[in-house]
Image (cartoon, rainbow, N blue to C red):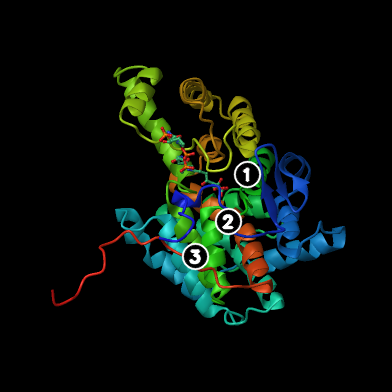
C-alpha cells in the first residue's frame, strides 16, 4: 500500500494544472471567459480560436481561421470509402457512429503529412484539420445510414455555412434555419471544453507519452462514448423514450417509473456530475434554447420538454440531483430531428477543440503521466508451492 490511499475514481483529486478552462461550482470559464457570456456573444468558431490559439480573434484572424476550417472540411477518398463500407455494420448495430468516427480519426492520422510531428506549429495545423473534418464525418455517416448520396463529398459542405450550419446541412442536404443553426452553434460552445473530464484526461495521458495528436483524439473519442460520460446525451433521450412508452401504455405515471428506477438503484442518464453538485451551468442555457425551439418551431415536441421537466423535478425534490448538459442536449437535438446515435459524435465535433488545446498544452510542458496503484491482490507466494 502506498502512504496515501487512492480515492476511488480519483474524485476530488487535482491531476495537474491547465490554463484552458476552470470548472467551478459557481462558474465555468474558458481562458477567462464565462460560459454564459460566450454562449450569448461568441460563435463556436470564435470559441474554438480562443481554445486552440489562446486568445479572442481579431476580425482578420477570425476570417483566416474560418477560411482554414472551410478549406479543410473535405475527407480523403480513403475515409469516404471506409464510411461507405461501414453501411452494413451500422445497419446491423455491430458498429455505432461513435465507433466509425473513432476509426475515421485514426485513418485521418495515417493520411496526415504532419502526423508524426508534435511541434506546436504542426499540432495547431492538425487541430484545425481535425476540427474541420468532424462534421463531415458525421454528415457522411448519416447519409450512408439513410441510404442517400453523400452530401458535398468534394468540399465537405457549403463554404457559406458556419461550422454548426454546415454540420446540419451535411446530415440532410437541406440548408438549416437560422434558429437551428444558432441552437447547434450554442450547443457546440457549451460542449467545447471542461478541463480534466475523462476523455480530455485520456487524450492528455496519451499525449504525455509523446504519442501523436490523432492517436490522442482517437482515445478521447473512445472515452467519450461511454454512457457515464458523453454517451449520456444519447442514453438520456433513450431513457425519456422508455418513460413515455411506459406511460402511454398505461403502465403507470412518470413518478411511478422514477420510483421504480430509484428502487432498482438505476442511474438516471443525464443527471449528476463529478464536479457540479448544485447543477451544471450549461444545462439551463441549453434547456431554455431547446424549449424555445419546441415552442416556436416544433410544438408537437413540447410534451417531451414537459416530460423532461417532470423528471428533473422529481430528481431534484427526491434525490437532490440535477441535470448535466447531456440531459437538455438529448431533448434539444431530438426536437431538432437529429438521429439519436449522432448526439455523441456531435459532442466530439465540439470537444475536439478542447481536446486539441489540452494535447498542445501537454506537449508544451510535458511529463509522463504515471500514477501509482495500491496492490490488493494475493500476498507473495512461490510458483512451485
Ligand atoms: C459528462 O467530468 C466532466 O466534466 C464530464 C462532462 C464534460 O463536459 O466533459 O461534464 C460531460 O460526462 C456529464 C456526465 C454524463 N453522465 C451521466 O449523465 C450518467 C449518469 N450520471 C451518473 O452516473 C454520475 O452522476 C456521474 C458518472 C456523472 C458522476 O459519478 P460520481 O461522481 O461517481 O457520482 P457521485 O459520487 O457524485 O454520486 C453520489 C451519489 C451516489 O449515491 P450514493 O451511493 O451516495 O447513495 O449520487 C448518486 C450516486 O449513486 N447519483 C445518481 C446519479 N448520479 C449520482 N443516482 C441516480 N442517477 C444518477 N444519474
Q: CA distance from mark 1 to mark 3?
A: 34 Å
All told, the count of numbered labels is 3
Q: Residue at x 48, y 71 (%)?
A: 106
Q: Residue at x 32, y 17 (%)?
A: 252
- Label 1: state its secondary structure: helix
Question: Which is more toward the observer, 363 or 123?
Answer: 363
- Label 3: state its secondary structure: loop
**Residue 143 picture location, percent across and down:** 47, 56
Instruction: Tell me whether circle 3 and circle 2 mark residues in contact (CB < 8 Å).
Output: no
Q: In which quarter of the view is residue 367 placed?
A: bottom right
Picture layout, residue 380 above or below residue 115:
above
Which is more N-terminal, label 2 or label 3?
2
Mark 3 vs ligand 1: CB below 8 Å: no
Q: Residue at x 35, y 19 (%)?
A: 256
Residue placed furthest toward the left: 385
Q: CA distance from mark 3 to mark 2?
A: 30 Å
Could you tell me if residue 149 is visible in this image? no
Mark 1 vs ligand 1: CB below 8 Å: no
Q: Name the residue tied to disc 1.
A: 187
Q: Name the residue tied to disc 2.
A: 349
Q: In which quarter of the view is residue 291 placed?
A: top right
Question: Which is more toward the observer, 103 or 232?
Answer: 232
Picture layout, residue 122 above or below residue 44:
below
**Residue 135 picture location, percent across and down:** 57, 58
Label 2 neighbourhood size at 10 Å, few (<14), some (14-19), many (20+)? many
Q: Quadrant of the C terminus?
A: bottom left
Amino acid at each position: 500500500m502506498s502512504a496515501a490511499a487512492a480515492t476511488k475514481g480519483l474524485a476530488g483529486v487535482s491531476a495537474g494544472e491547465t490554463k484552458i478552462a476552470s470548472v467551478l461550482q459557481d462558474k465555468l470559464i474558458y481562458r477567462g471567459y464565462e460560459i454564459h457570456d460566450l454562449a450569448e456573444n461568441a460563435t463556436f468558431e470564435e470559441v474554438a480560436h480562443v481554445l486552440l490559439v489562446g486568445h479572442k480573434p481579431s476580425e482578420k484572424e477570425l476570417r483566416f481561421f474560418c477560411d482554414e476550417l472551410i478549406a479543410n472540411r473535405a475527407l480523403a477518398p480513403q475515409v469516404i470509402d471506409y464510411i461507405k463500407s461501414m453501411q452494413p455494420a451500422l445497419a446491423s448495430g455491430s458498429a455505432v457512429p461513435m465507433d466509425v468516427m473513432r476509426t475515421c480519426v485514426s485513418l485521418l492520422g495515417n493520411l496526415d503529412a504532419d502526423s508524426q510531428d508534435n511541434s506546436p506549429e504542426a499540432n495547431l495545423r492538425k487541430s484545425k484539420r481535425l476540427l474541420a473534418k468532424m462534421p463531415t464525418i458525421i454528415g457522411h455517416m448519416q447519409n450512408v445510414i439513410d441510404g442517400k448520396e453523400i452530401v458535398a463529398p468534394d468540399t465537405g459542405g457549403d463554404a457559406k455555412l458556419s461550422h454548426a450550419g454546415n454540420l446540419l446541412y451535411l446530415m440532410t442536404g437541406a440548408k438549416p434555419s437560422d434558429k437551428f443553426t444558432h441552437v447547434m452553434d450554442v450547443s457546440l460552445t457549451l460542449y467545447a471544453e471542461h478541463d480534466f473530464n475523462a476523455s480530455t484526461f485520456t487524450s492528455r495521458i496519451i499525449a504525455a507519452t509523446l504519442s501523436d495528436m490523432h492517436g490522442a483524439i482517437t482515445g478521447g473519442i473512445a472515452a467519450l462514448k461511454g454512457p457515464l460520460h458523453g454517451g449520456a446525451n444519447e442514453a438520456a433521450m433513450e431513457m425519456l423514450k422508455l418513460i413515455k412508452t411506459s406511460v402511454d401504455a398505461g403502465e403507470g405515471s412518470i413518478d411511478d417509473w422514477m420510483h421504480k428506477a430509484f428502487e432498482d438503484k438505476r442511474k438516471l442518464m443525464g443527471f449528476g456530475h463529478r464536479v457540479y453538485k448544485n447543477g451544471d451551468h450549461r444545462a439551463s442555457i441549453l434547456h431554455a434554447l431547446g424549449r424555445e425551439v419546441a415552442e416556436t418551431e416544433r410544438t408537437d415536441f413540447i410534451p417531451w420538454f414537459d416530460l423532461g421537466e417532470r423528471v428533473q423535478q422529481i430528481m431534484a425534490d427526491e434525490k437532490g440531483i440535477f441535470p448535466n448538459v447531456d440531459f437538455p442536449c438529448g431533448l434539444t437535438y431530438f426536437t431538432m430531428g437529429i438521429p439519436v446515435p449522432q448526439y455523441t459524435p456531435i459532442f466530439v465535433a465540439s470537444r475536439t477543440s478542447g481536446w486539441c488545446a489540452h494535447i498542445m498544452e501537454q506537449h508544451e510542458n510535458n511529463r509522463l503521466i504515471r500514477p501509482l496503484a495500491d496492490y490488493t491482490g494475493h500476498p507473495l507466494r512461490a510458483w512451485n508451492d
